[in-house]
Amino acid sequence: MKRIVIFASGSGTNAENIIRFFNNSDNVSVIQVLSNNPHAKVLDRAKNLKVSALSFNRIAFTETNDVLNILKASQPDLIVLAGFLWKFPELILNAFPNKVINVHPALLPKYGGKGMYGMNVHKAVVANNEAETGITIHYVNENYDEGAIIFQAKCAVNTSDTAENVATKIHELEMEHFPKVVEKLLFSQKSN
């Protein structure tokens, strides 16, 4: 059985979509959702879907081994960041090499980096009159949005589109592609 741990900071629609995608799978299970926000809706979504859900603070994440030890105990095959806003510590990345992935709401390397998430990205795309945007699923490294790209999907940006329109298009791409890419990655990974 392949095991997934999801990190999320907010509403958790991507996390819920991934959990539901694998709900009836005999081969894959989302075993835990972790959040840096104790009030994040993702925690309720996970609990409603019978998935363990925990929140943690910055000290547990970056200054102690608390979150690392939770992950070591869980032994995930893949750690999926689904709207997780903190930079991932090297300690965890080193413990799980090439096992941490993220979805970004733009076609990296455009519109990546610190502070470039959610509506900030969509507003920048519209402000720069981009003809297209999309999603990038990538490995996580020590820098924001600079890990190796795994997958991209594109959508058109019309001149009449608002940042909200773009957000809707991006969300549809995430819903369609993110779980499938996660599944493909799980079964193409080399065993350690």
Image (cartoon, grey):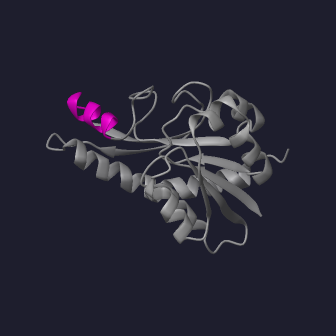
Residue 168 in the image: above or below residue 114: below
Residue 101 in the image: above or below residue 94: below
Write down the quadrant of residue 13 in the picture: bottom left
Residue lying furthest bottom: 24
Tell me residue 50's x, y (percent).
60, 71
Would residue 41 appear left or right of 88 to someone viewing this image? left
Q: Residue 81 in magenta?
A: no
Of 79 and 173, nearer the camera is 79
Considering the whole magenta stretch, tell me its main secondary structure: helix
> In the image, what residue occupies the spot 67% across and 55% down?
4
Tell me residue 58's x, y (percent).
57, 35
Of 31 and 102, nearer the camera is 31
Q: Which residues are magenta?
A: 119-130
Would residue 181 appear left or right of 171 to someone viewing this image? right
Would residue 68 appear left or right of 50 to someone viewing this image? right
Please say whether residue 31 is visible from this viewpoint: yes
Q: Quarter holding the N terminus?
A: bottom right
Residue lying furthest right: 192
Of 61 and 26, nearer the camera is 61
Please say whether residue 149 is visible from this viewpoint: no
Q: Quarter holding the C terminus?
A: top right
Tell me residue 130's x, y (percent).
26, 32
> In the image, what residue occupies the spot 67% across and 29% down?
63
Write down the quadrant of residue 187 in the picture: bottom right
Residue lying furthest left: 160
Tell me residue 117's x, y (percent).
39, 36
